[in-house]
Amino acid sequence: MSTKDSYPQIETLRLLLRRYKASDSDMITFLRTDKVVTQYIDRAESDANQSGLEFITKINVGIENKSLFSWAITEKGKDVMIGSICLWNISEDRKTAEVGYDLHPNYQKKGIMNESLIAVIQFGFEEMMLDHIEAFTHRDNANSKQLLERNGFKLEEQRTDKDNANNQIFTLSRI
């Protein structure tokens, strides 16, 4: 992890996770509206119709008030956003956060999200000192569930998402 402009950038073998820039707005709009990317996401219409720049502004407010961390996923040496990953919905005691992610279809099935998730889990546990990271994913999203399980997340069968009955909740604990 490195800090540039006091926001943590995360480097992996192939990737750089960095803060959003205005030039990411078209990709953000694509990721939030593409039928393949959003097939398992139930998003409020007001959120779905939000422009990329509006989304960046909203995320920057959350970053400034320390209620979330969100990164654009880029390949090293290429400053083009290909996906995003975040830790948000941070609990009041700052011991639990939710991870969320999306990736352009052209970059799926290449280990990019796995590499990003491993780095963000490490950031959450080592830098934020979280005890738990949760993921809410659609019960039919086999790829997301496989990614989570590969990284040690366990299905919380007794828990339900009060906002979306189709979601299953997975948890990874540091302890």
Image: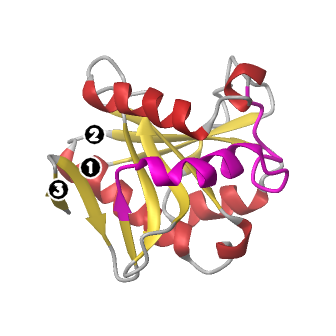
- Within 10 Å of disc 2 (Cα), the crowding (few <14, some 14-19, many 20+) is many
Residue pointed to by mark 2: 130
- Tell me the distance, in whole angstroms, between the alpha carbons under discs 3 and 2: 22 Å
Q: Nearer the viewer, residue 79 or 130?
A: 79
Q: Nearer the viewer, residue 94 or 22?
A: 22
Could you tell me which residue is drawn at 80 percent across and 33 percent down?
166
- Tell me the distance, in whole angstroms, between the alpha carbons under discs 1 and 2: 5 Å
Per the rendered image, the range of residues in magenta is: 17-43
Is 142 above or below relative to 70? below
Mark yes or no: residue 89 visible.
yes
Question: Between disc 3 and disc 1, whose residue precedes?
Answer: 3
Mark yes or no: residue 94 visible.
no
* Percent x, y of residue 75: 45, 76
Indicate the amino acid at tag 1. Answer: Phe
The answer to whether residue 22 is left or right of residue 174 is right
Residue pointed to by mark 3: 4
Could you tell me which residue is drawn at 67 percent across and 64 percent down?
104
* Percent x, y of residue 146: 67, 63
Contact between labelled residues 2 and 1, with CB atoms less than 8 Å apart? yes
Residue pointed to by mark 1: 125
Could you tell me which residue is drawn at 27 percent across and 54 percent down?
123
Residue 106 falls inside the magenta stretch: no
- Describe the element under mark 2 as helix, strand or loop: loop
Residue 23 falls inside the magenta stretch: yes
